[in-house]
Image (cartoon, grey):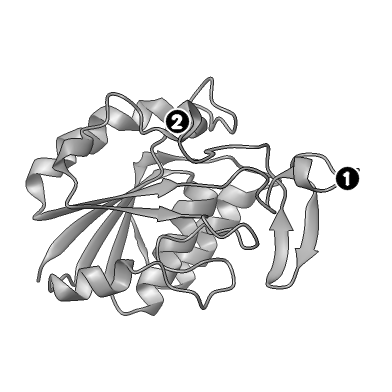
Amino acid sequence: MTHALIVIDVQLGFCPGGNLAVPDGDAVVPGINALMPDVPHVILTQDWHPAGHSSFAASHEGRAPYDVIDMPYGPQVLWPDHCIQGSADAAFHPDLDAARARAIVRKGMNPAIDSYSAFFENDRETPTGLDGLLRSLGVTDLTLVGLAHDFCVNFSAVDAARLGYAVTVREDLTRAIDLDGSREAARAGMRAAGVTLA
């Protein structure tokens, strides 16, 4: 059994004051840092959108943030512009111990497809490369933490379980956006996929 900690999108854009702030998002940082020395591998993910990304409401005339539209790969929530490549909004929270990371996986870089999961873009087929990295390291067990519980953490956890990893989500080290009950829906979906909620 080899363990990895996957730290999902602990970026200024998802913390208070960010362009897509998750309530209390910065509160997860000290606990995440405290976990890092206890695992052999720490992987960070980073939302890294080009300007004008198709998941931004501003890219669709007459649409507002949190509207849902149909994309070729399925329903897509439209977000405020956030985590644009190279911007302060896309930077990791300054208190996150990013120096401990073995690798940083950037996602959401394809302007035509959003990417919630650390493993696949939202077409559910295009890989990010994380699975290959973990398998090369012999990783079997994953702990997921970070932002946001009901979107990127949720999609990552379900994909990881589908790929055969033993997956635990530390709910105390995540925070949710909670759009129309999305937090409880995510919890139910993760449990159904075999993810342990701790």
User: Horizontally, is 38 left or right of 149 in the view?
Assistant: left
Q: Can residue 198 be seen in this view?
A: no
How would you rate the neighbour count of disc 2 (Cα within 10 Å): few for under 14, some for 14-19, many for 20 or more?
Answer: many
Q: Residue at x 62, y 63 (%)?
A: 113
What's under tag 1, amino acid-wise? Glu
How would you rate the neighbour count of disc 1 (Cα within 10 Å): few for under 14, some for 14-19, many for 20 or more?
Answer: few
- Whether residues under marks 1 and 2 lie with C-beta atoms below 8 angstroms apart, the answer is no
Residue 59 % position (x, y): 77, 46
What's under tag 2, amino acid-wise? Gly
Q: Can residue 193 be seen in this view?
A: yes
Q: Which of 169 and 83 is in front in this view?
A: 83
Tell which residue pokes out farthest to the top in this image. 17
Residue 183 % position (x, y): 56, 48
Residue 115 badge: none
Q: Residue at x 59, y 72 (%)?
A: 123
- Of callouts 1 and 2, the N-terminal one: 2
Q: How far apart are marks 1 and 2 (CA)?
A: 30 Å
Residue 87 % position (x, y): 49, 31
Residue that numbered label 1 is attached to: 61
Residue 184 % position (x, y): 57, 52
Q: Which of 179 and 120 is in front in this view?
A: 120
User: Horizontally, is 175 left or right of 111 in the view?
Assistant: left
Q: Which residue is drawn at 14% across and 41% down?
A: 100
Q: Which of 78 and 38 is in front in this view?
A: 78
Vertical position of residue 176 compared to residue 123: above or below = above
> Exactly how many numbered labels are in the figure?
2
Numbered disc 2: secondary structure:
helix
Residue that numbered label 2 is attached to: 25
Quadrant where the N terminus sits is: bottom left
